Amino acid sequence: MSNDHPHSGIADPRVTAVIERLQAARRRPAGGGPRGGSGSRDPHDHAEQGFSIHPEQGELIYLLCRGLRATRVAEFATSIGMSTLYFAAAIRDNGGGTVIGSEIVPAKVATARRNLADAGLAEYAEIREGDARQTLRDLGGPVDFILIDGWPGSTGPSLARQVIEIVAPQLRVGGYVMNDNAETDFLEFVRDPENGFVSITLPLKGGTELSLKVA
Ligand SMILES: C[S@@+](CC[C@H](N)C(=O)[O-])C[C@H]1O[C@@H](n2cnc3c(N)ncnc32)[C@H](O)[C@@H]1O
């Protein structure tokens, strides 16, 4: 089986069709990504690019959220909604609930909402437009899973570190955090036992950190 087309735990063809469409349209930014040396770090300069999680990460999100019986989850950030689709599918298949998304580029929020509607999952997602450091401050109660799939900042603590400090207290014990970009100061946070997580690095997309809240 090729990694490009992993077996999907998601049974709904309407959902998998949208995921496959986004996957087929994935492309590298012409002027370099925000993590490259020359690429702009302003997210508004990358409104056309998804920078989405890979299918194997999405499949793991779906499976873990089904196992947790997750009904409330959050993500930094949403982009065009690839990760949101996996979360919303799991929540719908668990019987209902909400994925709280966050995205600073308005055009991406619109695209993500369209993708969720195409998949028949619009009612399971609430995408908050704006800076996640504000929009994720109050998740309205405990959440079961948080994705930290952020963006390179310029100086000081990474956005991933800033956002995990805001959302970690809102994650229930027994809930998971997944991180895509291995920001050093984020890894320091989840690997410090003082912060209540046990954490492992999975060999997905070159290193995906999965952290379980234990205290
Ligand atoms: C790696 S992408 C997220 C991909 C998404 N999880 C998926 O799988 O499709 C990171 C996103 O963070 C957004 N972003 C950057 N800074 C932000 C901020 N301060 N608040 C909210 N979103 C932000 C960018 O516009 C970009 O779309």
Image (tube, grey):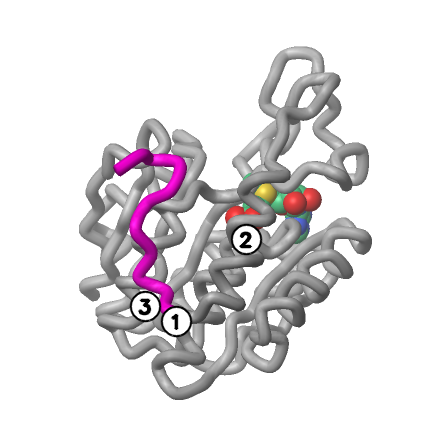
Secondary element at image label 2: helix
First in sequence, mark 3 or 2: give its number: 3
Secondary element at image label 3: helix
Looking at the rendering, in which quadrant would you find the N terminus?
top left
Give the residues in magenta: 1-11
Residue nearest the viewer, comparing 172 with 20? 20
* Residue named by callout 2: 82
Q: Quadrant of residue 169?
A: bottom left
Q: Is residue 174 left or right of residue 164?
A: left
Disc 2: residue Cβ within 8 A of ligand 1's nearest atom? yes
Is the Cβ of the residue at disc 3 closer than 8 Å to that at disc 1?
yes
Residue 73 position within the rendered picture, expressed as x and y whole percent measured from the top left:
44, 70
Mark number displayed over residue 65: 3
Q: Residue at x 39, y 30 (%)?
A: 184
Residue 78 position within the rendered picture, expressed as x and y whole percent measured from the top left:
60, 55
Q: Residue at x 27, y 63 (%)?
A: 64
